[in-house]
Image (cartoon, rainbow, N blue to C red):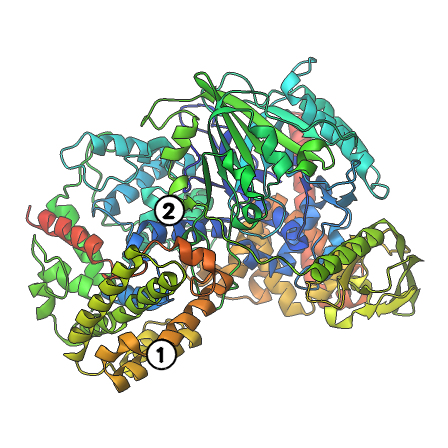
Amino acid sequence: MFVAIEKNRTGDELVTATLSWIDLTATDRDKVRRVLSLFNEQGTVDELGLGSLRDAFSDALFPGTSVLHTRLRYFLFIPWIYREIESWGGGYDVAYEARRLEMRLIEALAGSEDTAGIIGIQARESLGQLASTAYWAALVRWGIFLAGGNQGWYHTHFDSLVRRQNEVPRADDPGVVWTREPTWHPRLPEAPVGFPDEASFALTGEEADFVLGRIQERCRGTLLAWLAQEGAGSLADSFGEEPAALRAGGSIAETVELARRFSLHVEGAPLLYNLLLAEMRHDVQPGDADAALIERYRGELAEWAEREEAEAPFDTTPLWSFVARQGGRLVHPQQRFVEAWSERGSAIGARHVVDDDFLRRLIASRERQLKGQRARVANRGRLLDWGGRVGVGRMSFRWPNVRRLLMDLHAGLGR
Amino acid sequence: MLSPDQRTVAMEMLRPPAGYRIDQAVLTTYTLDLDVLLALPLAVLAHSDRGVDELVEQPLLLLEALREAGERLNVFVDEAGIAVPHTNRALYALLEECVHPVRAPGGGAFHPKVWIVRFVDEDDQALIRVAVSSRNLTFDRSWDIALTSEGAPEGRKKVRESVALADLLGAVPGFAVRALPAGVPDVLEGLAVEVARTEFPAPDKCEDPVAYQALGLSGETRRGWKPDYVGTNLLAVAPFVNRTGLDELVAVRGERTLISRREALDELPETVLEEWDSVMVLSEAAMDEPEDGTSTRPSDIHAKMIAVEHGRKVSWFVGSANLTAAAMSGRNVEVVASFTGPRGNEGSGKGFGIERFRESGFLNLCEPYQRVEKTKEDESLAAARGRLEEARDTLVRSDLRVRCAADGEAWRWVLDGELAMPPEVSAHVWPVSIGEDQARALALPLEWPLPLSRLTAFVAVRLSVDADVDDIRLVLKLPAEGMPAGRAAQVLRTLIDSSERLLQFLRALLGGLDGLVDWMTDDGNGAWQSEWAAGLGGETLLEDLVRTASRDPERLESVRRLIDDLRSTEEGRRIVPDDLYEIWRTVDAAVSARSKRLKNEEENPK
C-alpha cells in the first residue's frame, strides 16, 4: 500500500495532535454540518418536514445557491487558489495547501474595506467548514469547475488531473481515451497580482462578465439568470416585490408565483403547531407566558387566514408536477400531509383552521411520524423545553443570500 | 476549542501521512459492526471520500481491500459486543482472522476505544498514530470526540506518559477468550515496546506530551479513578452517569458543569444534581433533522470527557470512561488520555479553558436539563431483562464450537458443544453468512448444509423472553475445526460469475483501487468517467494491460492475484477464457523480465 509522496511546500511538519468531534465517515460529517447550519438558521428549523419542498423551489429559482453563501467573489477566489496549487505541479498535499491559502485569504479580506460576509473571520485556524466547501456545489453547478466531481474527489485525483492537462497526446496512443477536460473553466480571468495576500470583494468588470456568462450558460431559464441579466445594483428585500423579477415572463413567473402561493398556503401549519404546543403546555402548567402565546398565535393565524382567503384555493397538482419536473422525490407521507392540509383548509375556510380538530390532529400526527418519541406533542419533557416559537416564518428561498450575490455582480458589471 | 463544526473523520485516521504506508493497525472497541470492519481497509486504500454505506455494497472492492489490508488489522472487541449484521455476507469469513473477542478481567465490560496504527516509510522508519476516542466501531451517529496524536519511537528510554498504553497492548492478548492466531501476540508485543518509547505530543501550545491511563487491566477493583487535579471549575460530559461516578468529581471547588443525556439524568436522585451549578442536555434540534423515511434515532451525546481548571491551566481527560462506578473502579477496562494546556484569554479563540469551550459554540446546541417525573418501570419487565442478560452471559462463557466437514460438493456446518440455558429464555441461532429467516432454535448439535463460500466461525444468536422487552442479539466468534483453505478464492468466484463481469472488473482494476471505487460508485457526474464507459469489451483489454504494464506495473499485482485465484477452480477456469489467460501470461512475463533486467542494471551499472 504505497502513497504518492506528498510534501508541504515549505517543508513544515504537518500538525499531528488534535482534539475534536469525530464522525465515522465523511458523509456522516456532512450530515452533521447540515443539521448545524439548519440549527443556526433559527426560525427556519423544519418542524413539519416541508424542507425538501422549500429546497426544490430554492433550487429551481436560484440553482446552485446555498444559505451559506455570502459574497460573490468567492466564485473566483476558490478557483484562483486551486489554480495556484495546480501551477506548482503535482505531489503536494492539496487539502492542506488549499486550506493554508484560504487562511491567508481570510487575513487579506479582513484588512480590506468591505469586510461583510468573510467566511471564517471568527474561527480562523479552527474553522471547520471552509469557504471552498460551502461554494463547491455551486462551482460545479455554474460550470466554473468543469471536471465535475466533489471536492474530495478533486483532491484525490488532483495529480492525475494536473498531469492530464499537461499531457501532450502521444504517438503511441491513437484515439487516446482520456478526455482532456480542463478542471477550471478556460476563460476564468487571471487572479489579480498579490492574491491571496491582497484581496477584496469587489469584482472587476471582466470577472463580473465571466460569472454572468456562466450563469447564463448553465442556469438558463431561472430567476437567477434573469436577475443576473436584468437586475440592478439594488434589489428589493423580498424577490416577490422586486420589480425586475416581476418583469420576468413565462416559466420563471410561474415558478415564482407557485413558490409564493405555496409558502403562504403552508405558513399556517407551523403557526397552528405552535398554538397547539402553547395550549398543551398551558393545560399542564397554567401560566401567563403561555396564555400570552396562545393569544399571539391565534392573532397570527387570523392574520394569515385573511391573506390566505384573499387568494384562490390552493391547487396541489401544479405543486407535484413542479417537484417531479425538478427531479425531486415525491415522498408519500409528505405528500399526504400537504394534500390533507390543503383539502381540509379549502373545505372549511382558512379562518376556521385555528379551531379545526381534524387539522390539529393532522399536525400532531405529522410531528409524531417525523420524530417518534421526541415529538413535543407526545413527550412531556420536550414540550416543557419548547422555546415558544419554532419553525415559523415565511420561506425566503435563500433570497437574502442570493440578493447579496446579485448585488455584487451588478456592482462589478458597472465597473 | 471543540467547536461543533470542527470535525475529524475516523476513517481518515487510518490514512498514512505523506511518504508512509500502513504496517499494522490495532483497534479496540466495546461494540463492533462487522460491516464497519469490512469498510475500513477499503476507505483507507481507496482514498475515498464516499459514504461507507455505499462502499460496503461493493463486494468485489471489499474483497480486494481486505486481501491487501486484512493481515495488518487486529480488532479486539468485548466478547458480547459483536452486533448481528444487517446483511448476510460471505465476506465476513475473511474477517475471522482479524477479530478477537476479549473479556475484561474485572468482570465488567471491555470498553476502550483506542486506535493504534503503525506506519512505516521507505526506509522502514516507524511512525505511530494513536487515537483515544469515545466512539465504538459501529455506524451509530452520535456526538463523540477523539484525541489523536502521533510520534516516532526513539531511543531506549521509556516515556512515562506512554507506558500505560504499552501496558494495554501487553495485557490485551491475555484477555482473549480463545487462542489468538499465530503471530498476533508478537505483533502486539512489538508494538508495545515501541509505544513505550514514543512520546505523543499534545495539541498546540501544551508543553507535556499526552498522558495515557489504562483502567481495569489487572482485574482488581480499587478506589474510584479521579482526574489528577483538584482545581477550580469543572466540566464533565458523559452519556451515562451514576451517583458514584459523579460523587467522585465534586471535590472540585468552583463552578461545575455537567452535560449528559436526559435518560441518564432522569435516573439520578435529585440530590446528586444539586451539587452541580449547571446541568445540560443536547437540544433535540441539534440531533437528527426530521426526514421522511429515516429512523428517528437521535444522535445524542456519547463523548466522555472531563476538564479541570487549575491556576492558569486546564487539564482535559478524554476517552472511554463514563461517569459510572463500573468505569471508574476497575470493573471495566477503559483508556483515558489527558493533556494540560493554557486556559487562554477571552475572545482570543486560543486556549483550552472551559470558557473557550463555551465560546466555541457547542453549548449553543445544548439546553438546561429539566427534570421530568418518570413513571416507574414495571418490575416484571426489569426482571425479564435481567433474565435475558443472564442468559447472554451464560452463552458467552459456554463451550461452543463449529465443525465443518465436506459432503460431496457441499459442506456440513455443525454447531456443537456444552450449553445450559435457563428455560424461560428462548435462543435461536444461525451462521452470519445466511439469512436470519433460516435461524433455528438452539439445541445442540445443529447442522446446516452450506456451500464452501458460506462457511464461517461467526454465529448469530437471538435471545428472547415472553415479555415486552427487546430481544438481545449478538454474534459469537467460535473456534472452528475443519475449515477448508481457499475460502477467499471461493468467495471471489461467487462474485465474479461470468466473463463479462470479469472483464469489467479487470478494466476497473487496471485503474487502481481508487479508480475502482469511482467506477462502482460513480453517479455519472465525472467527466473522466467516459474512459471506462466506452468499450468495455475485451478488444481494448490488451491495450490497457500494456499501458498499465509500462506506466504502473504494481497495479498488475491485483490482476495477477485475481487471475490466479480464478484459475485455481474449475468454474473459475471457465470464466477466464484461455485466450485471455494467454494474453495475461504474455504481459506478465514481459513485466517480470523487464523488472529483472532493471534490477540487474541497478545492481550492476555499466
Q: What residue is drawn where x is 77% and y is 72%? A: B438
The residue that label 1 is drawn on is A357
Helix, strand or loop at mark 2: helix
Question: Among all residues in the image, which is located at the extreme bottom?
Answer: A347
Residue position marked by numbered label 2 in the rendering: A165
The residue lying at 28 percent from left, 56 percent from top is: A288
Q: Quadrant of the N terminus of chain B?
A: top left
Q: Between A261 and A15, which is closer to the camera in this rendering?
A: A261
Specify few, some or many for label 1: CA neighbours under 10 Å numbering under 14, 14-19, or 20 or more: few
Residue B324 visible somewhere in the drawing: yes
Residue B545 at x, y percent in the picture: 60, 54
Vertical arrangement, residue B180 with respect to residue B188, above or below: below
Position of residue A181 in the picture relative to residue A218 (left or right):
right
* B176 left or right of A297 in image: right
Chain under numbered label 2: A
Left or right of A11 on screen, residue A192 = left
Chain letter of the residue beneath label 1 in the structure image: A
Q: Amino acid at mark 2?
A: Gln
Q: Amino acid at mark 1?
A: Asp
Residue at 51 percent of width and 55 percent of height: B298
Give me the residue at 68% from left, 53% from top: B34
User: Looking at the image, do the residues carrying marks 1 and 2 touch, with CB atoms under 8 Å apart?
Assistant: no
Disc 1 element = helix
Q: Who comes first in sequence, dot 1 or dot 2?
A: 2
Quarter of the view holding residue B481: bottom right
Residue B13, x across and y down, in percent: 56, 38
| Both labels 1 and 2 in a single chain | yes
Q: Nearer the viewer, residue B475 or A161?
A: B475
Q: Nearer the viewer, residue B359 or B198?
A: B359
How many numbered marks, from 0 up?
2
In the picture, the disc for residue B213 is none
Q: Nearer the viewer, residue B251 or B466?
A: B251
